[in-house]
Image (tube, helix red, strand yellow):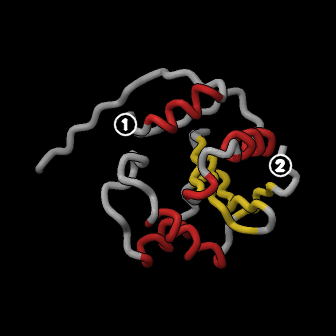
Amino acid sequence: MTESLILQNIDEKDYEFLFNLLKNRKPNVSISHKKMPTYEEHVKFIESKPYHQWYIIFLNGEKVGSAYLSKNDEIGISLVENIQGKNIGSEVLDLVIKKNPRTRYLANINPNNLYSKKFFEKNGFELIQHTFEKISNN
């Protein structure tokens, strides 16, 4: 395990970093963001405390991503692009699980996000469903 990998609870000084992380996310990565929020909408979302735990990921003292555990035990990890593919995500996943013991964890990912599908399968997650959505014009 990388000795210098740390998860720290988010606070106000992380809002801009989290906004930039979201802004730089590729379109096929997310299932929850249809459009980019404004900075004000982003801050309001963070301050609503949407997750059970939300962390900033530090590597060698530098912010390199975020991880969360939702109130439904769903894990989400987002890393800056130059850190992806270096096994940091697996270490972050292990830390989130160690800090938040549960009997079951979920990961909701976009079916088109092949990288995330492989990542979670490699880390012992099994596919349990595909969810369909229809948005009404009412």
One can see residue 70 in this view: no
Name the residue type under label 2: Thr
Query: In the figure, 136 relative to 122: above or below?
Result: below
Q: Is residue 112 left or right of residue 55?
A: left
Q: Position of residue 12 (x, y in %)?
A: 64, 77
Q: Is residue 59 left or right of residue 128?
A: right
Question: How many residues crowd around disc 1 within 10 Å: few (fewer than 14), some, or many (20 or more)?
Answer: few
Query: In the figure, 84 relative to 103: above or below?
Result: below
Q: Position of residue 92 (x, y in %)?
A: 72, 46
Name the residue type under label 1: Asn
Question: How many residues crowd around disc 2 within 10 Å: few (fewer than 14), some, or many (20 or more)?
Answer: few
Q: Residue furthest left?
A: 138
Placement of the N terminus among the 4 image quadrants = top right
Q: Which residue is mark 2?
A: 2
Q: Which residue is mark 1?
A: 112
The structure residue drawn at horizontal position 43% and vertical position 78%, both measured from the top left corner, is 40
State the separation of the CA atoms marked 2 and 1.
30 Å
Q: Which is nearer the eye, 25 or 75?
A: 25
Q: Position of residue 42 (x, y in %)?
A: 46, 70
One can see residue 2 in this view: yes
Secondary element at tag 2: loop
Q: Which is nearer the eye, 48 or 24?
A: 24
The structure residue drawn at horizontal position 56% and vertical position 67%, both measured from the top left corner, is 18
Secondary element at tag 1: loop
The structure residue drawn at horizontal position 68% and vertical position 58%, both measured from the top left corner, is 55
Kindly indicate the quadrant of the structure image that contains residue 4. Answer: bottom right
Q: Are marks 2 and 1 in contact (CB under 8 Å)?
A: no
